[in-house]
Image (tube, rainbow, N blue to C red):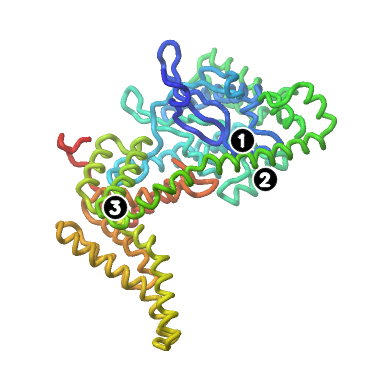
Amino acid sequence: MSSLKDRKIGAGRSATVYLDYLPDGRATARKIFVGSTLAGLVHNVIFGANNPYIWHRGSIAEAACRRRVLSKLMKLWLPGKLRIAEIISVSWNEDFRANEITMEFIDGRAPSLHHPFSSEKEGEIKDLVENVMKPLQGLLLDAGFDGLAWQAGYGNPVATSNFLLETTDTGENRWVWVDLESGVPALFPANPILLFTFYLQRTLLNGRPLYDDVDVPRLRDYVSRHQKELGAVLSEAELAELAQDVEELLPDAGDWRFMSRLQRSLQSRLARGKISEEEVSHYETRPVRWYARLAKEGVAKVARKAGELLRDSKLVKQLTHIVPKVRAFVLLPSYRSQLSRLLVARGIEDWHKRRQLDDREADLLKHEIETGETSLYITDFGILMAVKPFVKVITLAILFTLGAFGVIDVLGGIIGYLSSGVIVRTIYTTCRIIASTGRKAHQPWIALVVGFFPVVGNAAYPLQLLYEGTRGGNAVAKFIIYDLMARLGRAVPIWGGPDTLVEHKLNSIGDLLVRKRQALPELHEKQVF
């Protein structure tokens, strides 16, 4: 069997998820709470220790209990529409020195992004947000799950990535809430109104930011008020289990929330084997010395990381290979063509791995790369941007020389400087048109016309690409447009990332340019890779 590292299927701010199997062969998802560097920094600043799911045994047991409670409530709240991924076990992972949850493996996918063949699936994100997440948020708040509303998307656009769409045995689609454990405290909502009207109020009330908190008295009252409705969807045994789990959600005296900042800091490092019991006892009465030690270790860690980056950097090793590649990129059309097609193919494969493209859709796009012209426009844009600094330097040298000899005045120098890019773009694009005509391929006339304008002309080939994407056919051009917009969404700090609402919103902007989507044609055997 492959190593655990080879079976990594996902990573978030709180944990890394690996594919694993039970003795009976059933697939599971092992969620090991190792956290991310940025999330760890946020936790240490706010709570004085890393994510409690990593080091505090009680917090992981509480997480499993919350899932059991919500799994039963979901039968009343959103039957047939949403369910909770089943927890199989919780344990301490000695290799990672961290808590882990083993849960059922969900063979599902995120809501569909927009792409050339997505017209029948584009309603998925709206269905998730409007028909699942928004009703769920209200139900959670009503039942006392104030902290869980964050993971359900209450002011949190990242939360759409917490849900997967599965197909049931009867062929129907159903949403599964797979990630209920927050990666960071609920203090950074995208909606500033919610920050002041809800999250800051709860922060002041609790004395700390919300972090998957449950108001147990309110939950107990909710279950009592809806006993009849719950009895209609749950058995007597399930009702008894629900009542017991609700009581188990009451935090005990050893809960991390009741610890002081110093205690959390010490206990988190003790759990991960970084300090001993004796050191805990020593520093409990010497907080200044403890924080001085942390500061010293932090500086040493930063210095060590910087040294590792310099030592292991591949930049120095690759310098000898860069010059030949740059020369080939500039001088060899075949190399530019190969490189551009490879870059687009990698984007297609990334969407395929995310199950945003199925096998046939990915195969069609890959086939079109081999016969299409569109992907080359990205290379054209890159070439013009790469030579721009050299053109400007040479232009300035010539203009200063001509000015020194009185051949041109200041106005002539300005006109010459602005015209240099126009001249280079026009020459390059004219050559591209001639070459494309010889191959009976699409000619970049849009790029030629736009290139005549100073400054705006820098966008000549991106605009040509957009024009190609609005035409019938040419699925690759349309895919590139949607992919570029999705990449922008994933690059947005804090609220962006894969499968987030930000990625979906920016990706859908491509519809303003791609007005006409096409049906997926039949693939001939020779087209299939």
Looking at this view, name the residue that lies furthest to the top: 24
Residue 164 lies in what quarter of the image? Answer: top left
Q: Quadrant of the C terminus?
A: top left
Which element type, helix, strand or loop, lies under badge 3?
helix
Q: How many numbered circles are shown?
A: 3
In percent of width and height, residue 310 lies at 56, 44
User: Which residue lies under the disc numbered 2?
Assistant: 200
Q: CA distance from mark 2 to mark 3?
A: 53 Å
User: Which residue lies under the disc numbered 3?
Assistant: 336
Residue at (62, 28) in percent of width and height? 53
Left or right, residue 9 beside residue 60: left
User: Which residue lies under the disc numbered 1?
Assistant: 147
Residue at (31, 68) in percent of width and height? 425
Callouts 2 and 3 close, C-beta under 8 Å: no
Callout 3 crowding tier (Cα within 10 Å): few <14, some 14–19, many ≥20: some
Which element type, helix, strand or loop, lies under badge 1?
loop
Which amino acid, mark 3? Arg
Q: CA distance from mark 1 to mark 2?
A: 12 Å
Looking at this view, name the residue that lies furthest to the bottom: 406
